[in-house]
Image (cartoon, helix red, strand yellow):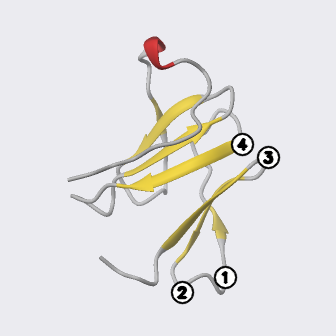
Amino acid sequence: ENPQIVYMAVDGGGIFKSTNGGFSWSARNSGLGLLDAWTIEVSPLDSQVVYAGIWHGGFYRSQNGGLTWQANTDTTLGPRVWSISARR
């Protein structure tokens, strides 16, 4: 795990990633249906796996450190995700 890698969920702006401890940011929104990001969590088992909750957009997963996102098609989760917790 690299302590310089930081993710940020921005309501109306999507997902941002910093590789220098938060000094600069780049948008990581490829594959997100909406940009109303509310929560984000990195897998404790694999730092390339990142989860995001999107208001009215549901749950997304990235398997490449946020470069691209795939929507979860499980409709039982509902359209609003406020919080995610990934634990070992």
- Along the polypeptide, which appears first: circle 4 or circle 2? 2
Q: Nearer the viewer, residue 81 or 24?
A: 81
Q: Residue furthest top?
A: 76
Which amino acid lies under the numbered mark 2 shown in the image of this protein?
Asn
Which residue corresponds to mark 1?
Answer: 24
Query: Which label belongs to residue 12?
Result: 3
Which residue corresponds to mark 2?
Answer: 20
Q: Residue at x 49, y 57 (%)?
A: 67
* In the image, residue 69 above or below residue 88: above
How many residues crowd around disc 3 within 10 Å: few (fewer than 14), some, or many (20 or more)? few
Query: Which label belongs to residue 79?
Result: none
Which residue corresponds to mark 4?
Answer: 35
Q: Please state the horizontal and vertical placement of residue 62, each as a whole percent of the image.
A: 42, 47
Q: CA distance from mark 3 to mark 2?
A: 23 Å
Which amino acid lies under the numbered mark 1 shown in the image of this protein?
Ser
Q: Is residue 33 left or right of residue 18?
A: right
- Splitting the image into 4 quarters, where does residue 20 fall? bottom right
Check contact, mark 3 vs mark 4: CB within 8 A: yes
Which amino acid lies under the numbered mark 4 shown in the image of this protein?
Leu
- Along the polypeptide, which appears first: circle 3 or circle 1? 3
Which amino acid lies under the numbered mark 3 shown in the image of this protein?
Gly
Check contact, mark 4 vs mark 2: CB within 8 A: no
Check contact, mark 2 vs mark 1: CB within 8 A: yes
Q: CA distance from mark 3 to mark 4?
A: 5 Å
Q: Please state the horizontal and vertical placement of residue 4, each as a whole percent of the image.
A: 46, 84
Q: Please state the horizontal and vertical placement of residue 87, each as a whole percent of the image.
A: 27, 51
Q: Nearer the viewer, residue 45 or 61?
A: 45
Q: Is residue 88 left or right of residue 71?
A: left
- Along the polypeptide, which appears first: circle 4 or circle 1? 1
Q: Is residue 59 left or right of residue 44?
A: right
How many residues crowd around disc 2 within 10 Å: few (fewer than 14), some, or many (20 or more)? few
